[in-house]
Image: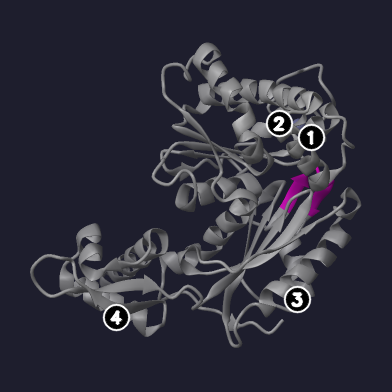
Amino acid sequence: MGMATDAVRRTNLSQVLRILHVEGPATRAQITAHTGLNRSTVGTLVGDLAEVGLVEEGEPRSTGGRGRPSPLVSVVPMRTAVLVIDVKVDSVAAGIVGLGGHRLPFHRLERPRVRTGIEPTVDDLEALARKALADLPAGQHLFGIAVSIAGLVDRHTNTVSEGPNIGWTQVPLPDLLLERLSLDLPAVMANDGDAGVWAEHLRGAAIGVDDVVYLSGEVGLGAGVIVGGMPLGGAVGYAGELGHMVVEPDGPRCGCGAQGCLELMVGEQALLRRAGQTEDGGRDALDAVLAAIVDGDEDALAAVARTGHWLAIGIANIVNVFNPRMVVLGDMHALLHPHVIDQVELRLAAKSLVGRRSPVRVVASRLGDDASAVGAAEFALEPLLSDPLGADLGTPATA
Ligand SMILES: [Zn+2]
């Protein structure tokens, strides 16, 4: 009886906190309507969450109807926060994310290809993480650390199994960082595409869309898939490596061992090479190409059209496999979206069996470069959202 009651209470607390976290402030009346719980139960749950500082009640807001106005309940964004680390090939970042998706401005560092090794990366991340931690008010609690990385991630061991574009194998990155920062915190690490698609689903371009594919081009092509509202994981959690779908079997050799992977045809290096820039030019070179496109430069336009050609082939295949309602293009491909969308839509209408029968919207990311970091933070907050009063709210940050 006691245990069953505890379990029900935990589920109800989780439900209330999750509504406020995902959907924003709500009146008690709205929470009552949303959960189907009765009013006095909601009052008790909100009181319990307020007592530990996870939520607060603001001024009563008139609902315009009869009866007493209902108080507005919202999360306390920084009651306990997550230190987020983002590792792409061209850049690394660190920042603080709290409840409700509230975030302090991220510290991002563009970096040359020579700094993608493990040691330089950890050096750069340590410096960025210290800046991020300095943003926290004194005595601020840290709930955990969340890492997003462009590579295969073993979530059970928090290890980067393989990162073809940074040349890493079997790297326990969160442990290395926690040691550098002298922090002892729960850590979560996720593949950038898995984190990115979750962020876009919760807080970005795909809110309310339960079948989504996210493709995010940088040097590689990160990808994540949500099917029926659930992240697609696969046997070991490696599912959704759409960037390594072979589209040109005689094409160039990929870091994964195959030839002609989609990411080689639509990634940053191919675009830069086609546009006459240095392949390893990074963000500066990419910005130059984007500016040239806007200026109507013929070489740049031809380069982006070639990228659009391969992207359209990739998306048409992906739509045949997953039948998504939406494809979200992130990072570099969000910037290219206006220049490639016609090619993609044409191919979907003409040469994708599923695409021409089931409407699919191909849109640009709303979270941009930060999507994967935002998603990783959501994964790290999950224990708190599942069991708000049972979770350790964390320790004051001192790094
Ligand atoms: Zn590959």
Q: Is residue 30 left or right of residue 215?
A: left
The alpha-carbon separation of the residues under discs 3 and 1 comes to: 32 Å
The alpha-carbon separation of the residues under discs 2 and 1 comes to: 8 Å
Of 183 and 9, the residue lying toward us: 183
Residue type pointed to by label 3? Leu
- Which residue position is annotated with label 2? 244
Residue type pointed to by label 1? Cys
Q: Which residues are magenta?
A: 160-170
- Which residue position is annotated with label 3? 181
x and y percent of residue 260 in the render? 77, 23
Residue type pointed to by label 4? Gly
Q: What residue is shown at x 82% (from left), y 29% (from top)?
A: 275
Q: Earlier in the sequence, mark 2 or mark 1?
A: 2
- Specify whether tag 4 is near ligand 1 (CB below 8 Å): no
Q: Earlier in the sequence, mark 3 or mark 1?
A: 3
Q: Residues within 10 Å of mark 1 (few under 14, many from 20)?
A: few
Q: Residues within 10 Å of mark 4 (few under 14, many from 20)?
A: some
